[in-house]
Amino acid sequence: MRVRTISIFLVMVALITGMVGCIPGPVQYDLTISVTEGGEVVTPSEATSSYNEGTVVPIVAFPHTGYHFDNWTGEVDTVADVHAASTTVTMNGSYEITANFEETPVDRPLVTFAVAGPMTEVQGKHQWWGAELARDEINAGPGINVGGVYHQVELVQVDTEETPGIPDEGVAALQAVIDDVDFVLGSFRAECVVGYREVAMEAQKIFMNCGSAAGFLQFSVVTNYDKYKYWFKATPYNEVFLVSSLCKMTTAIGRVLRATLEEYGDDVSPDYRVGEDGKLRVAILMEDALWCQGMVTAAQYLLPLLGYTVAGTTLVSPTAADITADLNALKALNPHVIFTAFSDSVGDVYSVQKADLRIPAMTIGVNVVGQLTGHWSNTEGKCNGEIVLDDWAEGLQYTAKTTAFFDAFMAKTGEYPLYTAGTYDAIYSLKEAIEAVSATHGWNNITDVIDPDNIDAIIQYLEASSYTGGAPTTAYYPMPAIELGGGVYALSKEQVRALYPDLATYNQTNWLCTASGGPHIAHDIVYGPGHATGIGSQWQDGHKVGVWPMDLGDEYDAALTDQYGCWNFEYPGTVDVMIPIGGFLSS
């Protein structure tokens, strides 16, 4: 019997080996690109190139002096954005497309955006780089179409410095330029933004918040609409939603961690074995900063509801150079997960000292410097396995426009984009609004569009519409229809259904709007699947890749569905989460 088994095996090997040469290779298609006078295509570099079926191919057109990119024509059904000079085409067949260029009118009028942020800090740098990328792309095309007259984008850099708790620098810097700009983008530290945004509100200029999560800033729209109606959130969503996404991510990854620990059984150190109650221990470690106050409260409330035991809460300085004592105290709690929120340099310090102290707990949370390309080298790879709530990751695609934005940003800066690079989408969303309302009202000059008597048209357009760019679709919560008293409001059933048409039932208490805790605030970002979710990115061997949202299988649909929708899904390009199990095992 044994000989026969071997013989049959050898025959099968021979048959399979012989068949290998007969298995056809991947289907390939040709992409042929031509150009009109006035420019060239720099990516791909060859006029005709071959690609495997389904490949998403970046295509980049570059205008010559005196010309601008107009559009892509030909077989363009799978081109992500035919009006973008930098976009992608998905190879589902062989295609012939043309990059079209037109002469640029001399002395085009300007639409001027102030970019306000701490320009010597990474958040401000990414605000500026995101805005520059949008400017360069728009100006490489015809520009912003204001009633048939094309305008160029101009940027004005406003360094708000943003020393914690001191808004004076930002107030003075924005006051110096406010009369010469049409729109304002930016912001970062809530303690400072609360001061300098007043400059824009008094000037009746739309300010797209691209940096501060604090819900109380948005709540001013509800309590004093006439003054603060110009204030819109572009990124990120507020701190309640930040914690909500962090908890969802921690729940999903916790399921994988728990299953892994159970699989290793007695090999796991007794200090880290899962108890009979099935709960994992989590330690909360956040900055001692205003933006974290609501997050700490929400985390302490939500994590136990999600099946975790909160072992302790520790707050550290955003710029602390040594948190060894804090980490040693935390290590003694034997947490399975450390739930973090860092916006400053302490994020690098944490990664290094946690590894040096051999704390095995998985890191899940917010770490702004942990989103940067340099985090790997700054920590000498000691961040491996860390998971951060993020906006972009290598290979992950929210939308058909994500890859083109991510690749262009990396090519320009050498950095992964931070969330504050959302200035890119903010400019494009304003471009769309300007073009729509100017066409409707017959305005052909940006001065008419932003006139205080006319600016409500832009505000109402933003309130009623949504924009899909490199990040997921951005839409805004409306002014709440229900006032409950005591500073508490709620969205009505009709308002909720308009945003979440698949909602099974309406419960008013789930849709509150308050200064803290009720996150459905006017002009803040609509949250949930199909809207803004955020992603969980993980450092895996030198690369920051997307691991959450994750699809755990149909059997988890009900458990992972809440009032916003089903979170049991994944974006294209998501990879498997890495569980660093070694530290949990007995030595």
Image: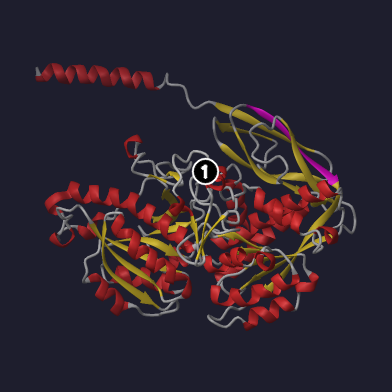
Q: Residue at x 71, y 45 (%)?
A: 84
Q: Residue at x 64, y 82 (%)?
A: 169
Q: Residue at x 72, y 58 (%)?
A: 135
Identify the main secondary structure in magenta: strand
Determine which quarter of the picture holds residue 53. Answer: top right
197 magenta-colored: no
The answer to whether any part of residue 427 appears in the image is yes
Tell me the kind of residue under disc 1. Answer: Tyr
The answer to whether residue 66 is above or below residue 565 is: below
Q: Under tag 1, what secondary structure? A: loop
The answer to whether residue 558 is above or below residue 231 is: above
User: 508 or 100: which is nearer to us?
Assistant: 508
97 magenta-colored: yes
Determine which quarter of the picture holds residue 95. Answer: top right
Q: Position of residue 417 (x, y in %)?
A: 55, 59
Magenta segment boundaries in residue numbering: 94-102
Q: Which residue is mark 1?
A: 500
- Residue 316 horizontal side relative to residue 75, left or right: left
The quadrant of the image that shows the C terminus is bottom left
The quadrant of the image that shows the N terminus is top left
- Residue 335 horizontal side relative to residue 397, left or right: left
Looking at the picture, the colour scheme in use is secondary structure
Q: Position of residue 101 (x, y in %)?
A: 81, 43
